[in-house]
C-alpha cells in the first residue's frame, strides 16, 4: 500500500495503486501477477539449486529478471514519489531501494523472490477485501435491472434507472421488487431477509413501504416509486459501505508515527552500515527486513474485514472512527420505544368484572377486529395467542374520543379510554375507577371494555422490554460499559416500569433537546458516549454522541443519516453484535501492529549484525506481512455471540394473566 508519511493517500488501494479497479477485477489481476511471479521464482530456484552449468545459469538469471520486472507497477509509483513528492517516504520507495541493492549484488533470484512475496501479500489483501465485500455486492446483484412500468397505454419493461419518482410499477409473484416505494394496490408477503436478516416474510398491503431487491412472494402489487434507483435503500447501503472501507481509524496514528520517524532512522542506519562495511548486501538485508508493508496493511485490512463481517449481519458501520470509538464506549444511552421495547404496547393485564378474562378479551377483540390502531392489534394478538375464536362484528365504527363502537349478536360493545366513556355517558363504578387508577399509576395504558352500559373489564397495555433486552444490557456491561441509561420521551411511570425490569437508570419525558443535553452532559464528564435510537426525535442525540447507533425501520431514514452505525431491521441484539465486532476489529489492529513490530525489531537486529542475507530478510518480511493478512482475515470468520431476538416482543405478555 502506498503510504504517505504525513497523511494517508486514500486514492491508493494497495501496494500497486489499484484503487480504481473493482474488487473482482483487482483479485483476478493480482492472481495473474502472483502466478507469473511464482513461476519465475520457482523456475529460478530450480536452476539455482540443481543446474549449475551454462547456459542454464544465464537463463536462470534472465527468468529471475523477468520476475523482477513484474514489480514494474511498484517501481513506477516509487519513481513518481521521488520526482514529484520529495518530502514523502513510501513503502514503494523503500522496497525499490532494497531491490536496487540486491540487483547490484547480482542476487537476481532474491529480487524475484521479493516481488513474489509482494504479489502474494497483494493477492491475499485482494482476497480479504473481495470476501469482505461479497455481502454488499450481492445486494446490488439482487436488485432487478428491469421494471414493469404502468402507463396509460399499458405495461412496458424499462430499465430500472428510467423509473422516475412517482411512477407506478407492477410486481408479480416470485419477482424481486425493482424500486423503493409504497404499495398502492394489492397485498402480499415480502421476503426482506436480504436487507433485514429476518427469515419470516413480512405481510404488506396498501400504504406499506417496500424496498428494491426484496422478493414478492404472493400477490400482484403496484408500487409507486418514492426515490430514484441510485438512491434506493440498497444503493445507500453500498455507498456507506464503500465509504467505511476507505476510512481510517485513529489507531493508524501508530503506523504514521512509524513511517515518519522510524523508517528514516533505519534508512540512515543502513547507509552507515553500508559505508562502514562496504557491503550492499547488508544494506539490502536491512532495507528488506524493515519494509513497512505489514505496518501499512495492519489497519485497512482489519477495517475492511470488520465492515464486511458487519454487513453480513445487517449492520452498516460508516467509518473507522466509529469502530474505534465504539470499542472504547463507557456510557450507553438508549431510547425506549422501538429500541428497548417494541414500537407498540402489548396487552399485559386483564381485569374482569362479572365475566371471565377470556370473555372480556373475546368481546374486546370482536369490537376491535376491523381497527388498525396499535392497541387494537395488541388485543387481536392476545386473542390469537389464547386461540380464541373472533368473528367479525355486525357493525363497527370508530367513535370520536378515542374509542370504538361495535355490535355483535345482541352485544352493544364499546372499547376506549376514560374520556371516551365520559363523552358517551357510560357509568364507571368506583371500584373499576380505583383499579384503573392503580394500573395507570404502575405505568399501564388502560382501556375500558363495555357491554351494553356496563363496564365488564379493564385492559392494561405496556411497552414490554424486548425478549433480548436484558441479555443485551448484560452483554454490554461485560464489554466494559459502565453506565447504561434509558432516555425516553415517555411518561415517568412507564419508563420506570421498563427501567426497573432491566436494572438500568432512566430519564423520562425527555424532548429531543433534552436527549442532546444528556449526551453532552456525559461527554463533558470525559466519557465516550454511544447513543442508540430509532426515530427522528433521536437524530440530534445520535449525531452528537461519539457513536450514534440507529435501529432503522421504515420512516427512520433521518436517524440512519445521523448515525455512525446503522442496524437494519428490528433487532436489538445486533447492537451487541456491533459492539463486539468493533472491539474485535480494534484488537486485531493492535495485534497486527504487534506482529509487525516484533518481526521488524528482531529482523533489524539480525540484519545490522550481518547475521542474515537478503533472502532471509525477505522471509522475515513475508512472515510479518502474511501474519497481518491472515490475522485480519480471521475477523471475517468471527461470530459474535448475541441473544436470539427473533421472537416477537411481548409473546409472553399475557402469560401471567392467563
Image (cartoon, rainbow, N blue to C red):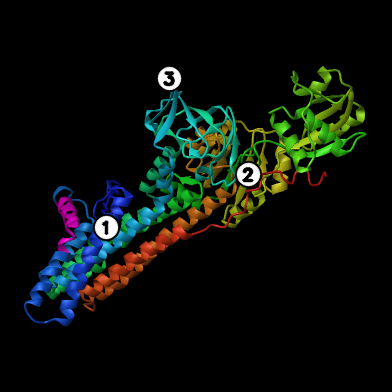
- Residue depicted at x 72% and y 47%: 501
Question: Does residue 78 belong to the magenta stretch?
Answer: yes
- On the picture, is 470 further left or further right than 314? right
Q: Residue 637: percent from the left, percent from the top? A: 47, 60
- On the picture, is 421 further left or further right than 614? right
Report the front residue among 43 and 176: 176
Residue that numbered label 3 is attached to: 153
- Residue depicted at x 18% and y 48%: 85
Q: Residue 253: percent from the left, percent from the top? A: 36, 53
Element type where label 2 sits in the image: strand
| 577 is higher (above) or lower (below) than 34 | above
Which of labels 3 and 2 is toward the front? 3
Q: What type of secondary structure mainly makes up the magenta span?
A: helix
Q: Are marks 2 and 1 in contact (CB under 8 Å)?
A: no
Per the rendered image, the range of residues in magenta is 68-82
- On the picture, is 388 further left or further right than 377? right
Question: Does residue 56 belong to the magenta stretch?
Answer: no
Residue that numbered label 1 is attached to: 30
Element type where label 1 sits in the image: helix
Query: Quick check: can you spot residue 288?
Result: yes
Which of labels 2 and 1 is toward the front? 1
Report the front residue among 89 and 74: 74
Point out the tag, 1 or 3, that comes first from the N-terminus: 1
Which of labels 1 and 3 is toward the front? 3
Q: CA distance from mark 2 to mark 1?
A: 49 Å
Residue furthest to the left? 55
Point out the tag, 2 or 1, that comes first from the N-terminus: 1
- Where, by quadrant of the figure, is residue 518 drawn? top right
Q: CA distance from mark 3 to mark 2?
A: 58 Å
Amino acid at each position: 500500500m502506498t503510504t504517505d508519511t504525513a497523511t494517508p493517500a486514500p486514492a491508493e488501494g494497495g501496494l500497486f495503486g489499484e484503487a480504481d479497479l473493482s474488487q473482482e477485477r483487482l483479485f483476478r489481476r493480482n492472481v495473474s501477477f502472483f502466478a507469473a511471479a511464482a513461476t519465475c521464482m520457482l523456475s529460478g530456484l530450480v536452476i539455482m539449486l540443481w543446474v549449475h552449468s551454462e547456459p542454464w545459469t544465464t537463463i536462470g538469471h534472465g527468468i529471475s529478471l523477468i520476475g523482477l520486472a513484474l514489480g514494474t507497477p511498484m517501481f513506477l509509483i516509487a519513481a513518481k514519489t521521488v520526482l514529484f513528492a520529495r518530502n514523502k517516504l513510501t513503502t514503494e520507495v523503500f522496497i525499490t531501494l532494497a531491490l536496487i541493492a540486491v540487483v547490484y549484488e547480482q542476487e537476481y533470484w532474491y529480487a524475484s523472490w521479493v516481488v513474489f512475496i509482494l504479489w502474494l501479500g497483494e493477492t491475499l489483501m485482494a482476497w480479504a477485501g473481495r470476501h469482505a465485500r461479497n455481502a454488499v455486492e450481492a445486494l446490488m446483484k439482487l436488485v432487478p435491472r428491469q421494471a414493469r412500468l404502468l402507463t396509460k397505454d399499458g405495461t412496458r419493461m424499462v430499465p430500472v434507472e428510467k423509473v422516475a419518482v412517482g411512477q407506478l410499477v407492477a410486481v408479480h409473484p416470485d419477482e424481486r421488487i425493482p424500486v423503493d416505494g409504497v404499495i398502492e394496490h394489492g397485498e402480499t408477503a415480502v421476503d426482506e431477509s436480504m436487507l433485514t436478516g429476518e427469515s419470516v416474510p413480512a405481510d404488506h398491503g396498501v400504504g406499506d413501504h417496500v424496498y428494491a431487491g426484496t422478493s414478492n412472494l404472493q400477490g400482484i402489487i403496484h408500487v409507486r416509486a418514492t426515490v430514484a434507483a441510485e438512491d434506493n435503500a440498497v444503493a445507500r447501503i453500498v455507498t456507506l459501505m464503500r465509504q467505511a472501507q476507505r476510512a481510517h481509524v485513529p489507531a493508524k496514528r501508530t503506523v504514521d508515527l512509524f513511517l515518519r520517524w522510524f523508517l528514516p532512522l533505519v534508512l540512515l542506519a543502513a547507509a552507515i552500515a553500508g559505508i562502514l562495511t562496504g557491503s550492499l548486501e547488508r544494506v539490502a538485508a536491512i532495507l528488506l527486513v524493515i519494509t513497512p508493508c505489514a505496518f501499512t496493511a495492519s489497519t485497512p485490512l482489519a477495517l475492511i474485514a470488520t465492515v464486511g463481517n458487519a454487513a453480513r449481519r445487517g449492520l452498516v458501520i460508516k467509518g473507522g472512527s466509529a469502530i474505534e470509538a465504539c470499542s472504547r464506549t463507557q456510557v450507553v444511552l438508549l431510547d425506549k420505544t422501538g429500541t428497548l421495547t417494541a414500537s407498540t404496547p402489548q396487552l399485559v393485564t386483564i381485569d374482569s368484572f362479572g365475566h371471565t378474562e377470556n370473555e372480556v378479551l373475546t368481546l374486546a377483540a370482536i369490537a376491535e377486529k376491523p381497527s388498525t390502531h396499535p392497541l387494537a392489534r395488541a388485543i387481536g394478538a392476545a386473542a390469537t395467542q389464547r386461540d380464541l375464536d373472533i368473528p367479525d362484528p355486525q357493525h363497527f365504527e370508530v367513535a370520536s374520543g378515542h374509542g370504538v363502537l361495535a355490535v355483535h349478536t345482541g352485544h352493544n360493545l364499546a372499547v376506549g379510554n376514560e374520556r371516551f366513556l365520559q363523552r358517551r355517558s357510560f357509568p364507571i363504578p368506583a371500584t373499576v375507577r380505583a383499579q384503573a387508577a392503580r394500573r395507570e399509576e404502575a405505568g399501564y395504558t388502560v382501556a375500558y371494555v363495555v357491554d351494553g352500559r356496563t363496564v365488564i373489564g379493564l385492559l392494561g397495555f405496556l411497552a414490554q422490554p424486548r425478549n433480548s433486552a436484558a441479555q443485551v444490557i448484560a452483554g454490554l456491561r461485560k464489554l466494559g460499559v459502565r453506565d447504561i441509561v434509558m432516555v425516553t420521551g415517555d411518561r415517568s411511570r412507564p419508563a420506570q416500569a421498563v427501567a426497573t425490569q432491566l436494572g438500568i437508570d432512566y430519564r423520562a419525558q425527555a424532548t429531543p433537546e433534552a436527549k442532546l443535553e444528556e449526551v453532552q452532559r456525559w461527554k463533558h464528564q470525559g466519557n465516550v458516549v454511544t447513543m442508540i435510537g430509532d426515530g427522528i426525535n433521536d437524530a440530534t442525540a445520535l449525531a452528537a454522541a461519539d457513536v450514534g447507533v440507529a435501529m432503522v425501520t421504515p420512516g427512520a431514514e433521518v436517524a440512519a443519516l445521523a448515525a455512525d452505525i446503522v442496524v437494519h431491521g428490528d433487532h436489538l441484539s445486533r447492537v451487541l453484535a456491533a459492539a463486539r465486532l468493533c472491539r474485535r476489529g480494534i484488537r486485531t489492529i493492535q495485534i497486527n501492529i504487534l506482529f509487525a513490530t516484533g518481526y521488524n525489531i528482531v529482523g533489524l537486529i539480525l540484519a545490522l549484525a550481518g547475521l542474515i542475507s537478503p533472502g532471509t530478510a525477505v522471509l522475515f518480511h513475508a512472515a510479518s506481512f502474511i501474519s497481518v493478512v491472515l490475522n485480519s482475515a480471521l475477523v471475517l470468520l468471527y461470530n459474535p455471540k448475541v441473544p436470539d431476538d427473533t421472537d416477537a416482543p411481548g409473546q409472553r405478555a399475557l402469560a401471567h394473566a392467563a
